[in-house]
Amino acid sequence: MKSLLVLSFLSFSFSCCVHSQGSLNIQSQPWIPKKVNWNEGSFETLYFYNDSCFIKIASTQVLTEKDSVNFMSEPGFILYSGKYSILKSGSEILLSYRLLYRTFKLTGEKLPSDYMSERLFVNTTDKGSVIKMKDVPYIKGEKVTKESYQKLQDII
């Protein structure tokens, strides 16, 4: 029920904007860290929508018996949301985003937070693309389950 309330809140809170796709193929797919400690399963997932909207979710994920990644919102999650633009070089992405929701609020924390900016770097080779955010390499989450992929698409 809590997840449903959060999703409802988010859908009313945002109106996404102009297209900013550029030539990079980063949209409509989850990006997960290249190296994950699956015993812990807690990491951030990046998702770039086709209309220049962006989310980053810190939550628990599990690697299932079928070698698929399953997105879970329990015991809680942290949601950042904002906009992105691909710079002309095609190897950089500029983000403007803010902390929107945290399951467990911190004392004195203002939600939504102020906007922050960040520059991501993209390296594309014949083996695929890697997005670097704060020195953490992210790869396409090709093993994300259909259900988890749908949850990410439905957040905004």
Image (cartoon, helix red, strand yellow):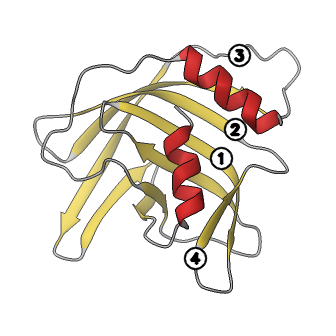
* Of pointers 3 and 2, the one earlier in the residue sequence: 2
CA gap, disc 4 and disc 3 = 33 Å
Decide: marks 2, 1 in contact (CB < 8 A)?
Answer: yes
Three-letter amino acid code of the residue under disc 3: Leu
CA gap, disc 3 and disc 2 = 11 Å
CA gap, disc 2 and disc 4 = 22 Å
What residue is disc 3 on?
Answer: 111
Decide: marks 2, 4 in contact (CB < 8 A)?
Answer: no
Name the image quarter holding residue 101: top right
Q: In the image, what residue occupies the spot 63% across and 16% down?
A: 113
* Of pointers 2 and 1, the one earlier in the residue sequence: 1
Of tags 2 and 4, the one toward the viewer is 4
* Residue 85 shown left or right of residue 138 in the figure: left
Check residue 78 in the rendering and tell me which mark sits there, or answer none: 2
Q: How crowded is mark 1: few (under 14 residues within 10 Å), some or many (20 or more)?
A: some
Check residue 58 in the rendering and tell me which mark sits there, or answer none: 1
Element under label 3?
Answer: loop
